[in-house]
Image (cartoon, rainbow, N blue to C red):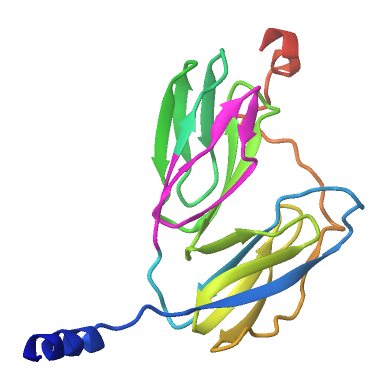
Amino acid sequence: MKRWLALLLVLLAVPLPARAVPVSGHVRFVGRAPGVSVPTIVYAEALDGGRVQPGQFKMTQSNKTFMPHVLAIPVGSTVNFPNDDLIFHNVFSLSRPNPFDLGLYRAGAAKDRSFTTAATYRVFCNIHPQMSAIILVLPTSYIVEADNNGNYRLDLPAGRYRITAWSERAQPSSVELSAGSGAPAVPDLTLDETQFAGVQHKNKFGQDYPKSAYDPKKN
C-alpha cells in the first residue's frame, strides 16, 4: 500500500502537458485573381515568451526550380540544399542581415545553411536567373500554410499570441488574441496584393545576368 501511495504522489507531482487549443481562422485576399495559388504562411508568436524548437528542412534544386518556392522555418533551423539536376547550381542570397553564398556545386551534391536570425531571405541561383525562392525564418515554431481558400488552423498552448499572415505579394497582416480553454474567435487577416509587381533580380555580384543565362538550351 505504501508503495502505491508513493507512486501516486509522484504521478500527482508531475505536471501535465499543456493542452493545445485549436485556433482556426481565415485569410482574405485582395487583388488576387480567382484560381491563382500563392503560398500563404500563417504563424503565431507567443507574446508571453516561449521556446522555439528549430528543425532540419530541405529546399531541393530540380528542373532549374527551387522546391518548395516558399519555406517557412523556426529560427535556429538548418536547411539542406540538394542539387537534383544534372547541371551545376550556385545557391545564394543577398538578404540582410546574413547574406550567404553556397558556391558552385555539382549534381548529386548538397550543402547546408543554418539560419540564426529571423528575417526574410530571398534565394537565387547565380547561374540560372529563373530560379528564385524565399526562406521565411520566424521567431516561433507555430507555423502553418493556409489552403487555397485562405483557411488555416494552429494548435496552440493556452496563452497570448500575435497571429500573422504572410505572402510574398503583400505586407504581412497581424492580429492579437488569447487562447484559453476554448477555441477563440479569430478576426479575418487581410492580405492586399494589389500593389505587387515582380522585380528582376541581379546575380550575386549585383550585376545583370548575361543574356546567355536566359537561353534554356545553354543552361
Q: The N terminus lies in which quarter of the figure?
A: bottom left
In the shown orientation, is residue 213 left or right of residue 57? right
Frontmost residue, 28 versus 103 = 28
In the shown orientation, is residue 28 left or right of residue 157? right
Q: Residue at x 57, y 87 (%)?
A: 178
Q: Is residue 103 above or below residue 54?
A: above
- Position in image of residue 170 (x %, y %): 75, 59
Q: Residue at x 81, y 60 (%)?
A: 149
Frontmost residue, 170 versus 156 = 156
The image quarter containing residue 145 is bottom right
| 77 part of magenta stretch | yes
Q: The C terminus lies in which quarter of the figure?
A: top right
- Position in image of residue 100 (x %, y %): 46, 38
Can residue 2 be seen from the camera position used here? yes
- Position in image of residue 113 (x %, y %): 41, 40
| 187 part of magenta stretch | no
Frontmost residue, 69 versus 117 = 69
Residue stretch in magenta: 53-79
Extreme-top residue of the structure: 218
Extreme-left residue of the structure: 2
Q: Residue at x 64, y 68 (%)?
A: 153
The number of numbered badges drawn on the structure is 0
Q: Is residue 17 above or below residue 94?
A: below
Extreme-right residue of the structure: 34
Q: Is residue 200 above or below residue 83?
A: below
In the shown orientation, is residue 145 left or right of residue 14? right
Can residue 46 be seen from the camera position used here? no
Q: Residue at x 85, y 48 (%)?
A: 36
Frontmost residue, 175 versus 25 = 25
